[in-house]
Image (cartoon, rainbow, N blue to C red):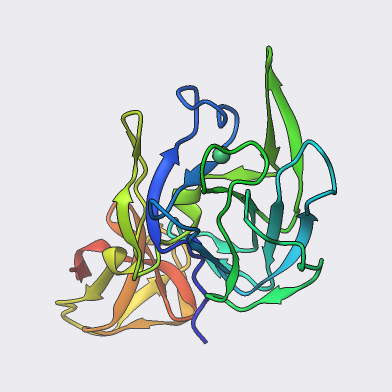
């Protein structure tokens, strides 16, 4: 079985607010607002096989907008080479009164639709990603500014792949470009290995590295390349993650 990839849960990507100092309501988080198409309410898909681990429904509290936390039910693969559990929170969805804690979704299933519940000026999905299985927010403060931030926050663009069928309409906010990555963009072929197999190592120290048990690649194999370290690349191939000589990978 291949490792399941973690995906951004919308098909049309249009960022209406980034994060950091220049943002108005994401100053202390890595939250992004996705507004999707101009009109209507876009579907929000399960980013991976997951279950509802926390839920703010209408009437739960006056302060919070509708929010659904989804935690992966197994380890998932990220474009930065992380392989582990992830939790996301989706805020402002339209209609979630029928949802239940523990409810499960298969990857790609429609979970809900974007909306404008709580304090929102238009239909959008406020998305945050957390590394691990904790589903919670905490109120972070800086002077007079306060913001609810997911526990163990990580950057969406580093932990969620763009779906292959996604359309990017806008990935820039106030001069900051968010580089969302499709798997196909970081997929490379093993080429020109003179004496096969190409050995996959457990560490990037080529001399001392031990070769993984099934650490053999052949010319023509596809790998996801996460990053380079010196002359080595950190890669994924089926259920294997490790380091290979960079010079044998090409597009
Ligand atoms: Zn937001």
> What x and y, as percent, mark residue 31?
55, 41
* Residue furthest front as drawn: 39
Viewer-closest of 226 and 172: 172
**Relative to 132, is 48 above or below?**
below
> What x and y, as percent, mark residue 21?
49, 22
- Residue 221, quarter of picture: bottom left
* Residue furthest top as drawn: 143
Viewer-closest of 236 and 164: 164
Question: Going 52% across and 77% down the picture, which residue do you hit?
Answer: 3
- Residue 207, quarter of picture: bottom left
Q: Is residue 113 left or right of residue 101?
A: left
* Residue furthest right as drawn: 60
Ligand 1 located in image quadrant = top right
| Figure disc tally | 0
- Residue 244, quarter of picture: bottom left
**Relative to 63, is 234 above or below?**
below
Question: Going 34% across and 45% down the picture, which residue do you hit?
Answer: 171
Question: Going 67% across and 60% down the picture, which residue do you hit?
Answer: 95
**Relative to 85, is 19 above or below?**
above
> What x and y, as percent, mark residue 208?
43, 62
Q: Is residue 229 left or right of residue 136?
A: left
> What x and y, as percent, mark residue 36?
42, 54
Question: Going 49% across and 33% down the picture, which residue do you hit?
Answer: 19
Which part of the image, by quadrant, shows the C terminus?
bottom left
């Amino acid at each position: 079985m291949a490792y399941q990839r973690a995906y951004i849960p919308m098909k049309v990507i249009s960022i209406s607010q980034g994060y950091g100092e220049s943002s108005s309501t994401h100053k202390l988080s890595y939250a992004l607002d996705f507004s999707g198409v101009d009109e209507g309410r876009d579907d929000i898909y399960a980013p991976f096989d997951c279950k509802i681990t926390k839920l703010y429904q209408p009437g739960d509290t006056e302060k919070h907008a509708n929010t659904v936390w989804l935690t992966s039910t197994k380890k998932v693969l990220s474009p930065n080479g992380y392989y582990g559990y992830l939790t996301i929170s989706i805020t402002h969805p339209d209609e979630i009164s029928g949802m239940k804690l523990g409810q499960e979704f298969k990857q790609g299933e429609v979970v809900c639709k974007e909306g404008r519940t709580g304090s929102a000026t238009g239909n959008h999905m406020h998305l945050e990603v957390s590394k691990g299985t904790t589903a919670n927010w905490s109120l972070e403060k800086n002077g007079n500014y306060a913001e609810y931030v997911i526990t163990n926050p990580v950057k969406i663009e580093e932990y969620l792949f763009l779906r292959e069928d996604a359309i990017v309409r806008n990935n820039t906010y106030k001069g900051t470009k968010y580089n969302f990555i499709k798997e196909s963009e970081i997929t490379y072929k093993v080429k020109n290995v003179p004496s096969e197999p190409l050995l996959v190592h457990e560490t990037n120290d080529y001399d001392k590295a031990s070769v993984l048990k099934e650490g053999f690649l052949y010319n023509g194999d596809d790998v996801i390349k996460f990053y380079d370290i010196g002359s080595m690349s950190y890669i994924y191939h089926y259920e294997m993650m490790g380091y290979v000589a960079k010079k044998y990978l090409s597009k």
